[in-house]
Amino acid sequence: MMTSSFNRREFAQLTGGLLAALGIVAPTGEALAEVRLGKPEPFSFDGLIAAMKEKAAKPYVPPKTRASDILDKIDYDAHWKIQFRPDHTLELGGGKAPIRFFHLGRYFKDPVGINVIDGNTAKPVLYGPDYFDMPKDSPARELPKDIGFAGFRVMEEGEKKDWLAFLGAAYFRSSGELDQFGMSARAVAIDVAMPTPEEFPRFTDFWFAPLETGTLTIYMAMDGPSITGAIRMDCDRSKGVVMDISAHYFMRKDIARLGLAALTSMFWFDELNARNGKDWRPEIHDSDGLAIWNGNGERLWRPLNNPPTVMTSSFVDQNIKGFALEQRDRNFDHYQDDGVFYEKRSTVWVEPKGDWGPGTVQLVEIPTDDEIHDNIVAYFIPEKPAKAGDEVAVDYRLHWVAEEPYVPPVARVWSTRAGMGGVPGQPRPKGVIKFVVDFEGGGIGKLGQQDGVEAVVEASSGKISGVYTLPVVGTERWRAVFDFTADGTAPVEMRLFLKDKTATLSETWLYQYHPGTLVPLD
């Protein structure tokens, strides 16, 4: 610990030798890292699991927020002006995983513990205001000198940009394969879209293991009113970002809806419902669909909606093979946004390890009128209810990639469009809407009209008519077209796939149609 008898350079040299022994080094150049570490405490993942199990048996104690009135003054603009000092970067593995910290503020008031593992012990990183450059008029200057960190981000080698960030509740984000942050993941989702308020447990402490193989290992403790958790995450940056996650959750209370491997995204509008958009850009979304590879081997694609009311869709399964919120549309011209680059947002694929047994992939879609709101949530709910005293252990892999890691051998949905029903040049029938679904891949582009490609279309209500298919000239795609007449205003569940005389040729397109939202019915 630094004392008044040490000057800055002497302390940096001392800690530099200590940190090197832990696999942590100071940056090269004139500025040396000042990463102050506290006293060591025993640490192991088994010990963390045992501690969180013991904690779950006790009543929840919410964090006691310090200096809340001062933190309230650190709004978005004030927070942005507080800059982490690069010379205080925590560097693991010879600079392969530089770690920088976030300051507390109005939206992140409770600090998290940051620890560095050394063998069977771990040392806490000690906060100091000197980790940050603050404007002279910043409210942060009034905070206690040991207030703590809000979270952290992991930088690329060379420290020019970050690829992984933990900030707030139990959320985390990655820039993925295309180096663009977008959607988020979180450890669990509790009671989403239920009559009771949603619960947001939070990561309270993090431990970094020495970087030896190129894989960054992070341990996390999670705590909340109904649940505690111990999580290990192994992060690989070689192609995209792949996270191997081992999680142990302990229930303090019964949880009506426990969502595992939760993904959170944003969908405002795309080419299907662009008429409902109020923006000059043709499409705005972080993800455009939910993909599921179910236990029977069927591949499903569900285009996302911005529904008129909160909608929850459930896909029951046994031993699911994977699911994802995907961004399939990678064409810049479809977005025209050279500031946030929606075409580069990650597809995030959840790959279960082992048999997850019976359960449900659930998709929650929440109405939004702006791109600033995360209004899409997807997660897996085990069939067995989560009861007080239960432990739920789950292992899975998260892929933050440009394309889903296990591309199906059949054609995938390329696009979904809708317009007036009927035939051009003839009086259009009232109340009829035409759906057009394009498919590509799986060798379908080699087929012609003589090969008997058919569309199988079903709907939970209403009338389907005028079904036909055709190859799209000048592409490798096939198009399925049908007219639909609703018999009411209730949402309609649609299902479509392509086949020939011997085999299924495509994944299954699923769509939830809200009559009147795409094309006026009168």
Image: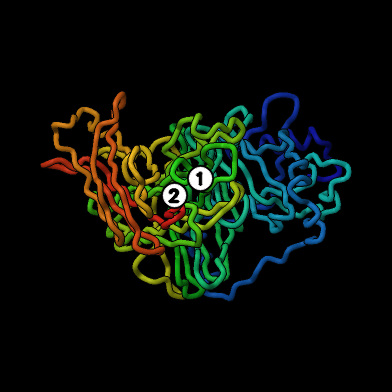
Snapshot quadrant of residue 7 = top right
- In the rendered structure, which amino acid carries the disc numbered 2? Val
Residue underneath mark 2: 519
Q: Is residue 213 visible?
A: no
Residue to which mark 1 is pinned: 275
Tag 1–tag 2 contact (CB < 8 Å): yes
Binning the other alpha carbons within 10 Å of mark 2 as few (below 14), some (14 to 19) or many (20 upward) gives some
Question: Residue, x 65% and y 55% (percent of image)?
Answer: 112
Residue 429 position, x and y percent, is 34, 50
Secondary structure state at the residue bearing disc 1: helix
Which of 381 and 8 lies nearest the eye of the viewer? 381
Image position, residue 208 (x, y; %): 56, 46
In front here: 257 or 40? Answer: 257
Counting from the top left corner in percent of width and height, residue 200 is at 57, 62
Amino acid type, label 1? Arg
Residue at image position (46%, 30%) is 331
Question: Which residue is rendered at x = 76% and y = 51% of the image?
Answer: 75
As rendered, which of 361 and 143 lies closer to the eye?
361
